[in-house]
Amino acid sequence: MNTDTLAAPVIRVQGVSLRYGDTLALDNLSLDIPANRMVGLIGPDGVGKSSLMSLMTGARKLQNGKINVLGGDIADAAHRRAVCPRIAYMPQGLGKNLYLTLSVFENIDFFGRLFGHKQAERQQRITELLASTGLTAFHDRPAGKLSGGMKQKLALCCALIHDPDLLVLDEPTTGVDPLSRAQFWELIARLRTRRTGMSVLVSTAYMDEAERFDWLVAMDEGRILATGTAAELRAQTKTDSLEAAFIRLLPNEKREGHKAIVIPPRDTHSGTAEIAIEADGLTMRFDDFVAVDNVSLRIERGEIFGFLGSNGCGKSTTMKMLTGLLSPSEGEARLFGQTIDVNDMATRKRVGYMSQAFSLYSELTVRQNLELHARLFHLPAADIPARIAEMGQRFMLDSAMNSLPDALPLGIRQRLSLAVAVIHRPDLLILDEPTSGVDPVARDRFWELIIDLSRRDQVTIFISTHFMNEAERCDRISLMHAGKILASDTPTKLVERSGHTTLEQAFIAYLQDAVGIDEPSVSESEIPLPTTADQYTAPTDSRFSLLRLFSISRREAIELRRDPIRTLIALFGTLFLMLTFGYGITMDVENLRFAVLDRDQTTLSNNYILDLGGSRYFIAQPPITDYEQLDRRMRSGELSLALEIPPNFARDLQRGNSVKIGAWIDGAMPTRAENIRGYVQAMHQTWLLEQARRHTTKPIPASLMNIETRFRYNPDVKSLPAMVPSVIPILLMLVPAMLSALSVVREKELGSILNLYVTPVTKLEFLVGKQLPYIAMGMVNFFLLCAMAVWVFGVPHKGDFLLLTVAALLYVAFSTGFGLLISVFTRSQIAAIFATFIATFIPSNRFSGMIDPVSSLEGGARLIGDIFPGTHFLTICRGTFSKALGFADLSQYLLPLALSILIVVGLSVSLLNKQER
Amino acid sequence: MLTLLNIFHLGIKEIRSLGRDTLMLIIIGFSFSGQIYIVASGLPQSLNKAPIAIVDEDNSPLSVRIINAFYLPHFMTPVIIDQYAADPGMDAGLYTFVLDIPPNFQRDLLAGRQPTIQLNVDATRIAQAFIGNSYVQTIVNGEVSTFVQGHRALVTLPVELETRVQFNPNQSAIWFGSVMELVNSITALSIILTGAALIREREHGTIEHLLVMPLTPFEIMLAKVWSMGLVVIVISTASLIIVVQGLLEVPLQGSLALFVASMALYLFTSTSLGILLGTVARSMPQFGLLLLVILLPLEMLSGGMTPRESMPELVQNIMLATPTTHFISLAQAILYRGAGISIVWSQFLSLFVIGSVFFVLALTRFRKTISSMT
């Protein structure tokens, strides 16, 4: 063993275990990572590499054991804060910690701001980094539109902006084409020659890459298999390649049955080969972007055809056109001589497809998954059990039949996906990167199945992959780049033609020919890399920094600006809602339909009816003829009021006998019924007085006394002036809360939440920083709503507008904070939407006093109304709009509003985790 | 036949997926139990605990009699205040009503001088202002007449108006609020379940997997409609029986089967609307906002909160094109007024027509989004 490794290790791991639920990801693991080296973590996906890395960088919370990083305990928050500026962590997944709508420059700039660099310094560093990674030409391109390799380079720039002493890269080259991969490692190598003190820890699934690292850690199932240099590992296992060495290191039961892959030659002599797929000039355009450019292919029946290229080069799009998922913009694809028609179900039955995104329905068991697909492909019901049994045996799934896919190792899941894709005996099997992340043994087993399908069942296989050794197993391969096929032939011929010795070198040569002109190779650029750290200001590790807070706000604001549709819905949607509510909700009950069962039919009874029908509250409907009809018309809701005038009404009245008029009121809607009763009774009284005056000679006083009703603040008792100011609190609750509610949970779903874990930004800075742009937007909404109230609805604002503005600011700060609280609390966007809707709409609409004053509410509703800040804002809103009030009258309501902000922000901060759990 | 089988199997898959989303199930459970209970039991009767203050400048037996005539549940016990406290109290929203009994009121009344009582109403609280005003008038008039009758005879006319409130004789707000809140939950849940789930499937790429199988967009969509519709029907029927009839003790009039049938038809429409929204929105944040813009008018303007009659003609007509308006009128007719199919068939027809239009629109958009998907 090399003597250097005995020097103080940069990371010391002691007895670390990690559990996710029932799964043990790391099993009592101990390890020393030597300093100043390039250390590789090797092993397939799901063996704990990523978990270990996230624990080492402090991104994930340590469950037990101890990890020392850069001379301190990583479990100690103070130490984490202190060393966090010295560590850079690039998570797995292409550009997972990048912001896809932000440009290349804005992404790096954001990280620079987070680490507290000054403007001039940032500018200089970014220029240098972009130049050294060859990204200068893409300065303004959104990160989402970069190819996989460029995304990784950008992520590296973001990681390097603060001059780390420890660089942690989690599978930085997975899914990247060989040329970009080579450039990436060259860049790292040059970095290390300039900054000799830097330690680098890399994980990878490519064994050929790992050969070049200084020191290796081989992992499997949360444990360490072996450590040492590549040469040491090979010597230890007596093998000649690292891949073989790794397989040898695996425990016996895993290696069992593993043998080198042998590909029987295709039987091409039996007459003329049938053409399975034929593509002619396939082209796919999305708007102005050409994803696939004039691709032509001919694949024979039973052939294994490989498709190589970087992510985003058009492989998946081509495959989708061949499955009929997409119709090409130009060109034609034929399957067994027939043109592929997107809507042709018969074609689909001949094709099996296994996509990279979809694995399986995780909520169905293995058997249920197989059954569902067998049914959907219309296998005869009687044959299904036999077919499933056959698949189970052939794909070695028997022991897993009743498990859920998520509980199975990736290798088995991959076999299940394949079983699902071939359950209907397709003639053509399309596999989109089926083996990425699977360990070498499982990968070889998978290939045995594929070869068996091709050679024995004559299934045509169309497969895309990143692995060169897999490509070498194909009968023919196509190299693809930027939507074009660069070359197409058998692997050996491709290598021969390029004049290189390996397929990888051949591929790189083809790529260089294709891109050499427009993308300058990094190795040729002579721009110096940043050298030492001491010329830059030391990043602050203060507990609160406005600079960091504003950099979060700035980024959130840019993202908001890049999604103009969202902004438009937020602004115009609010105005639209105010318009509908302002005009739509009214309490003045008018135009009530009534009808009369007039069994008197005299002038007097007619007079009574006319009196009622003449008012603006009632609209007369055709008279009622009998009780049965009265009942039916009321039940259907046609009539809100039915009157019955008894026989001999006029005669009895003349004689001074007492008479009863019956009034039936539809009580289905209690408020309306109450109004109707009031109207009818008032009108009845008026009619009585009038009749009395007409029939007696002596003067009858109108009444004993008068009640003079003064309707305050809204003298015409119109709904509109009362409604418009009360709609503002509802809308300023719902819309800003919905905007902010998705901001955190979305980062959780998309992965960029990691930047909170590994940068010096604090929880408070993160949350308040996110909140500010939404508060600003909420205030724009507020001013628009006020303008609309005054100029569109003509509801004057009588009181102190400054007070209202201050109150609105506090209220919007609350509602956005409330949205953030929900966002922190939920795990999925759907749940966040539903929860936000229920938690904001019900209280602001029902319990804040918009229609019924809070003091009139009962039980839980009353309690919610009392503590809901919308109640106070409504009081202020009505006070300044309708009652001409100012600070002196209403300032006491500002305090609860301010308090509510502290509560929601405080709760959010305490619920948000600064480490992943 | 094959199509039906596909639709059936796919629908089962949808239900199984939902069954594993625990947090969503909890929120759904709350929305159909706790939410309905709190809203319905918390909403006041048409006039409940209205805050009233009285300025008594007369201090006579009559004024005391008037003060004592206001009591719970319609009014809070009146607060006796002086003239100067009236305006600040109303400004702060402490009282909806302030009744001012002038000096020498009783004396002037008995002398036949027709004295005037002043009633101040906070007309920004529009609902209480209207109803409360007529209550106050009736109460004061009643007290005054009884008081005067004790002193001299009054001329009365022999015509009496006998009002009978049908279908909800006590005008219980719980009866009304519970069912309307249930309708709101049905609308919100059915739109979110289908719409947001569609966007999630698109974001996670699982929808693409379905499309390589021999399945048509029509089958995929109908599977979502029936499965999510069924989930909502089961939950809301349970909620109607357990929460509304059981806990809140609301007597429901008409046939439950007829109501469930109307609900099924409504869900066909609202789930189609959800899918339509899911195809219009490009991302979850957009869907969230779009949902507000669509859902709020549906819930607030379709007659479940305020009477349709009082809305402007234009709004009424536009809302006639939405399914919620017809469903609310169906729910009111069947559950409160006990209407049968012979009375409500036209609303069934409207729902069916609107539902078919939404379904076809959603299907067209769904096909289009799929073909442009990358």
Image (cartoon, coloured by chain):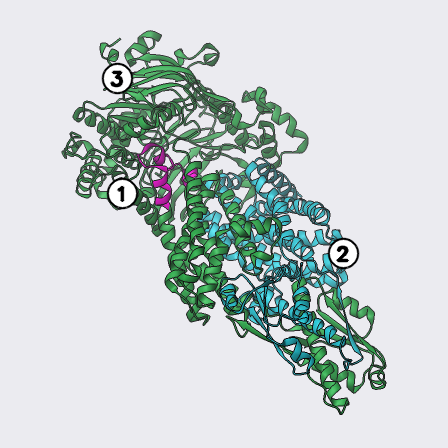
Marks 2/1: CA–CA distance: 65 Å
> Residue A636's x, y, as percent?
73, 65
**Front one among A645 and A571:** A645
The residue beneath circle 3 is A214
The answer to which image quadrant residue A88 occupies is: top left
Q: Residue at x 64, y 52 (%)?
A: B40
Which disc, if any, is residue B253?
2
Residue B114 relative to residue A455: left or right: right
Q: Is residue A597 above or below residue A188?
A: below
Q: Residue at x 53, y 57 (%)?
A: B296
> Residue A138's x, y, as percent?
25, 43
- Of marks 3 and 1, which one's residue comes earlier in the chain? 3
Chain letter for mark 1? A
Marks 2/3: CA–CA distance: 82 Å
Secondary element under disc 2, as helix, strand or loop, is loop
Marks 3/1: CA–CA distance: 39 Å
The residue beneath circle 1 is A547
Residue A499 shows in the view? yes
- Marks 3 & 1 on one chain: yes
Closer to viewer: mark 2 or mark 1: 1
Q: Label 3 sits on what residue type?
A: Asp
Closer to viewer: mark 3 or mark 1: 1
The magenta region covers: A747-770
| Chain A color in figure | green
Q: Label 1 sits on what residue type?
A: Leu
